[in-house]
Structure formats: C-alpha cells, structure tokens
Amino acid sequence: MAQTATSSICSLVLRIFTLVLLLISLIVLTTNTKTIEVSDGSVRLRFSDVYSYKYVLAAIVFGTAYTLLQVGLSVFKVINGSDSNILFDFYGDKIMSYMLATGAAAGFGVTADMKQLFDASELYFHDFYDKAYASCSMLFFAFVCTAVLSVLSSYALPRST
Amino acid sequence: MAQTATSSICSLVLRIFTLVLLLISLIVLTTNTKTIEVSDGSVRLRFSDVYSYKYVLAAIVFGTAYTLLQVGLSVFKVINGSDSNILFDFYGDKIMSYMLATGAAAGFGVTADMKQLFDASELYFHDFYDKAYASCSMLFFAFVCTAVLSVLSSYALPRST
C-alpha cells in the first residue's frame, strides 16, 4: 500500500511536469509566425502552413487533454486513496506516448528538411524554424515523461488481475 | 504452460510479419530515385538527399536487426521450450516500437510537406514521394505489429518476478 501511494505521487509529479511541457510547447508553436519583406510585397509563414506542424498541434492538444484528465484522476486518488483504473492507465499512457513521440518526430523531421531547403534560398526563415525546434523539443521531453509513465503503468498491470 | 507456448508462437508469427514488412520498406526506400530533365541538365533526387528519410532508414535498419535477433531467439524458445527473457522483450519491444513509430511519422510528415512544396513548382517529383509514402506505410504496419508485441510483452511482465 505504501509503495502504491509513493508510485501514485511519482505519477502525479510526472503528469504535472508533462502538462507544463505540453503547454509551453503549445504556446511556442501557435505563436510562431514570421513575416519577410520581399521585392513585391511580403511573405508570411505560420505553423498552419506546414502539414506536419498541424499534426504536432493535434498531438499536443490530445496529450494536454489526456494529461489534464489523468492529473484530475491522480489528485482524486491521492486524496481518497482509491484504486486507479490500471487498464485505462496502461492503454492510455501507451497510446499517448506513441502520439507524442510521432508528433515530435514529424516536427523535427520537417524542420530539419525545410531549414536545409530554405538555407539554399534567399528567404530568411531561420527564426521560424528555430522556434519550431524549441516547440518540438518540449514535446519530446513530454514524450519522455509519458514513456516513463507507460513503463510504470505496465509494471502495475499484475494488480489489475 | 500451454498458454505460454501459444503466445510464443503468436509472437513468432508477428515478428516474422514485422520482418517481412521492414524488408519491403527497406527495398522500396533505398531503390527510390528520380531523375528529371530540366533546361540546363538534370536534377536527381535520392532518399539520402532528405534528412528525414535517413532517419527512416536508421529506424528500418535497427528494427530489422532487433527483429532478426528476436526471431532467432523465438525459434530457439519454441523448439527448446525454454523461458524467454521477459525484461529484454519488454524494454526491447517498447523502444523498438517507439523507433518505428517515429521513423514512420518523420517520413510521412516530410513527404506530405515536400509534396505540397513541389506541387507549386514545375519539378515533377510525384513518383518519388509516392514511393516514399509506400515505404513509410510498410514501416507503419511494422510499427503496429511491434506495438501489439509490446502489449503482449507487458502482459508477460508478472512472470518475470
């Protein structure tokens, strides 16, 4: 029982940390715009102009909603000492960790290749892609936390039977 | 014991299926080149010109090596009826499923955005990106198999203690 309480608090701390990382990632991604003056007007780049960043946004939004739900449930569990829904934690953490991992990977991949492509052109979008990197890095750290949570919830599986 | 033997055979079938998918993905990715004649010569595009596809290749190579090792171990287990290394399976399947998922995500993301970018130019690289999609789709199905294996090896965890 003491071990269960400790692991509940550990999970809660990890989830709050994940939530903070996801919120920072969300803010950095959605506020990322860059306008460049060119000879015949201006070029404006937003995160929504890049398909992959839309998927990154979807991953962050689903991740945030799931983590908020889990933080709520964890606080309830820690206060009331009630049992957690082990199967929900197991599959939820697993699916969410895949979602965050793929979001970060799609973001990193497209950023690296777009940066290389724009390096060859005269359009200076470095700031934009540097901010995108920052957002994806936060998402990656949120994934690492969720992967650890997924290992913890796998070890809790025996208690579900 | 009967259940363990059945799940060993299930795992073996899934691993062989993963291996076949990874090999198809590898062949489609590495043989993917496209040469286009332009006014002043020709433009040649290979998978190694795109950062993200290099990561896709790395994911496929690591995935293939790991799956080959696991197929070898599984055949040995099925023939000798010996116990499997449950912790190695658990962490191995988990890490490999993340690697394959991120490989497929990076590949899909960059393909979608590059296609959109080249649609706007007069360079006709559709074949190249369609083949890249095919390779990433195979990698995605290999990931699904590995994710199922990862669930199975999580359920086997209680037997490790």
Image (cartoon, coloured by chain):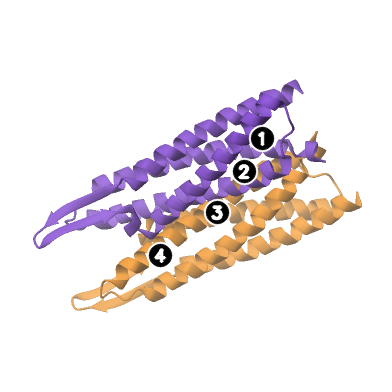
Chain colours: A orange, B purple
Residue B65, image x, y percentages: 53, 44
Alpha-carbon distance for marks 3 and 2?
Answer: 15 Å
Q: In which quadrant is the C terminus of chain A drawn?
A: top right
| Numbered circle sitting on residue A112 | 4
In the rendered structure, are the residues bearing label 4 and label 3 in contact, judged by CB atoms less than 8 Å apart? no
The residue at which mark 2 appears reads as B93
**Mark closest to the chain's N terminus, 1 or 2:** 2
Relative height, residue B92 to residue A52 (above, below): above
Assign a secondary structure to mark 3: helix
Alpha-carbon distance for marks 1 and 2?
Answer: 9 Å
Chain of residue at mark 2:
B
Are the residues under marks 2 and 4 on the same chain?
no
Residue A7, image x, y percentages: 81, 54
Residue A158, image x, y percentages: 80, 38
| Numbered circle sitting on residue A101 | 3
Q: Amino acid at mark 4?
A: Ala
Q: Amino acid at mark 1?
A: Leu
Query: Label 2 crowding class (10 Å Cα cut-off): few <14, some 14-19, many 20+?
Result: many
In the rendered structure, are the residues bearing label 1 and label 2 in contact, judged by CB atoms less than 8 Å apart? yes
